[in-house]
Image (tube, rainbow, N blue to C red):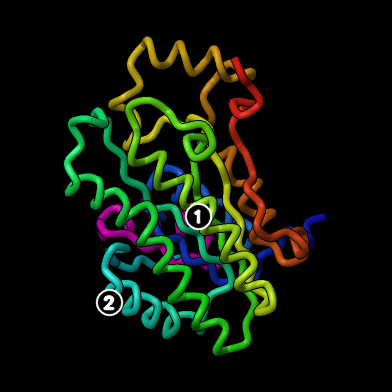
Amino acid sequence: MSKLFDLTGKTAVAIGGNSVLGSSIAHGLAEHGAKVAIVGRNMEKAEEVVKAIVDNGGVAKAFQANVSERESLLQVATDIEAWSGGWDILLNAPGKNSSTPFLELEMDEYDDIMDVNLKGIIQACQIFAQKNIEQQRSGSIINISSVSSTTPLSRVFTYSVSKAALNSATQYLAKEFALHNIRVNALIPGFFPAEQNRKILNPDRIESIMKHTPMQRFGTPEELQGAAIWLASEQASSFVTGALIRVDGGFGSMTI
């Protein structure tokens, strides 16, 4: 079983790897043998994640990039290729949110969120997949979606729209890349308190979330690691692509 989930010799690129969920998954990948490129807009935070991974015996390096800017992604893809020769696992975990009511939403804010949550991930998939196709190298792309992608949540209109579109893109790209041996899947986390959603988690909202979560609790970032490691492993999930995997404490199974 240990060989089934062994990522030794693999390179993982964690875009948004300096976020709460992204960094936890990056730690999990490193603990299973992958060397990890932590890609973030904030270099200081990326370096902190790298230090924690290295202190734990892993191999990692920080890279700076803005996912909404194509040239920035092209440069970081080139830099990672120079560092490690290429990639085997691409984790797309950037995220931006806002609680602005729909009728007050300005298009600048809408564009900003969509640029990070959707456009940035699509660009990353395009740029990194192209490199592997040219090298005839297989890969596993793991996109981080959200429960709001299948059941739109109040107060997060643009976020819900971006994640619903990401689910569709994930399944489209699974078909597009299948013959190139690049698998594309998405994780659908439930409620994991993080920087981007703490501001909307008031007592009333928490009570509502718990009523719709059969396990009656929030998730912890470490609880995403198992599903991500499974999807990252060529052996363990070799026939899995286009899947939307829920890790939500049962939230998606509730109707009323």
Mark earlier in primary sequence (1, 2): 1
Q: Please state the horizontal and vertical placement of residue 236, each as a whole percent of the image.
A: 77, 59
Amino acid type, mark 2: Glu
Residue extent of the magenta highlight: 34-59
Look at 59% across and 32% down and name the residue there. 248
Answer with the quarter of the image where residue 203 lies: top left
| Vertical side of 64 occupied by 25: above or below | above
Look at 58% across and 20% down and name the residue there. 213
Give the label on residue 71, or none. Answer: 2
Drawn side of residue 228 relative to residue 161, left or right: right
Q: Nearer the viewer, mark 1 or mark 2?
A: 2
Q: CA distance from mark 1 to mark 2?
A: 24 Å
Q: Please state the horizontal and vertical placement of residue 230, each as a whole percent of the image.
A: 69, 54
Mark yes or no: residue 134 visible.
yes
Amino acid type, mark 1: Ala
Badge 1 marks a residue whose secondary structure is helix
| Vertical side of 191 occupied by 211: above or below | above
Q: Which residue is mark 1?
A: 26
- Could you say which is closer to the camera, residue 18 or residue 118? 118
